[in-house]
Amino acid sequence: MADKQISLPAKLINGGIAGLIGVTCVFPIDLAKTRLQNQQNGSRLYTRAAVNLTLVTPEKAIKLAANDFFRHHLSKDGKLTLFKEMLAGCGAGTCQVIVTTPMEMLKIQLQDAGRIAAQRKLMPETVAAGTVETKSPTAMQLTRELLREKGIAGLYKGLGATLLRDVPFSIIYFPLFANLNELGKRGADGPAPFYVSFISGCLAGSTAAVAVNPVDVIKTRLQSLNRGSTEDTYSGVTDCIRKIMRNEGPAAFLKGAYCRALVIAPLFGIAQVVYFLGVGEFILSFLPKKDN
């Protein structure tokens, strides 16, 4: 299998389709996860999937295709060791943040708008004085505002925290999935049944998700621009960690872990089934082949 040629266009299609299907299924849980992670000072207030559906296609395509690309090239000189599997995952996680950071930034603003609106209705005393109630912004309005006020850097707020989350996630997820999937293979060269790939994706995804949840909490807080008068604001990763520890305690870093596991498990289980089915390869098989 190590010398088998991979088709990057097919893998990109597979990742995009997997992302669209997965996000559609898990978006309500992802919304709950973001709200939970943004709770502060005892608040218990709990949409839109358009940003996720639009940007998750290139995000998942890059992540899954990049991992396959790195695994393929790292296995050329011999056996793909655990270290090389982790290195491939590291490369995939690093590549994906190009799309993940602005996607998460916009997603969190849109999801958080509902939380702030609920706060205004139920707890008006927690909203900063002089705040004018407005309709929830659209993704395009948020993008234009961020670009106008802060330039391209506005969309990449929280880049460091996103790297700290996505790189370790991929280092854990991809080797764990590959080894779990290997256990269910039919024979030495046969592929694992699709249900084995699905279960392996779910187990590896939920494990990696819980492992990096503390960094996901930090990233969510840093990328949330809307704050009530009683809620902390943060100047960076270190400041965020210090304030969470001081005001909320270590348990705050596990906020949303259960929801995050519920989001990631089926999302990556679906992604691996799409890879198993080879949707991208099937689509590309209808295209005319170039003559050598």
Image (cartoon, rainbow, N blue to C red):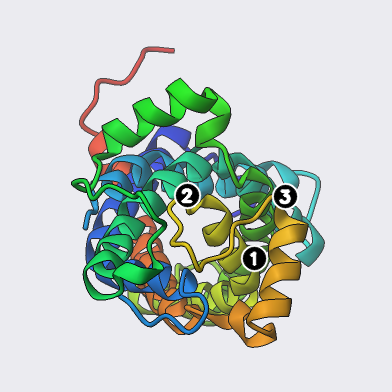
User: Which amino acid lies under the numbered mark 3 shown in the image of this protein?
Assistant: Ser
Q: Say what secondary structure mark 2 lies in.
A: loop
Q: Is residue 14 visible?
A: yes
Mark in the foreground, 2 or 3: 2
Q: Find the distance from the CA under tag 2 to the CA under tag 3.
A: 43 Å
- CA neighbours of label 2 inside 10 A, class few (<14), some (14 to 19), many (20+): some
Residue 66 in picture, x, y percent from top left: 57, 43
Mark 2 and mark 3 lie on one chain; the one further toward the N terminus is 3
User: Which amino acid lies under the numbered mark 2 shown in the image of this protein?
Assistant: Leu
* Residue identifier under label 1: 215
In which quadrant will I find the C terminus? top left
Q: Is residue 213 above or below residue 104?
A: below
Q: Residue at x 44, y 31 (%)?
A: 146
Q: Find the distance from the CA under tag 1 to the CA under tag 3.
A: 31 Å
Q: Quadrant of residue 12?
A: top left
Mark 1 and mark 3 lie on one chain; the one further toward the N terminus is 3
Q: Give left or right: position of 290 versus 135.
A: right
In which quadrant will I find the N terminus? bottom right
Mark 2 and mark 1 lie on one chain; the one further toward the N terminus is 1
Q: Find the distance from the CA under tag 2 to the CA under tag 1.
A: 18 Å
User: Which amino acid lies under the numbered mark 1 shown in the image of this protein?
Assistant: Val
Q: Residue at x 29, y 41 (%)?
A: 54
Q: Residue at x 69, y 50 (%)?
A: 235
Mark in the foreground, 1 or 3: 1
Q: Which mark is residue 75?
A: 3
Q: Which mark is residue 225?
A: 2
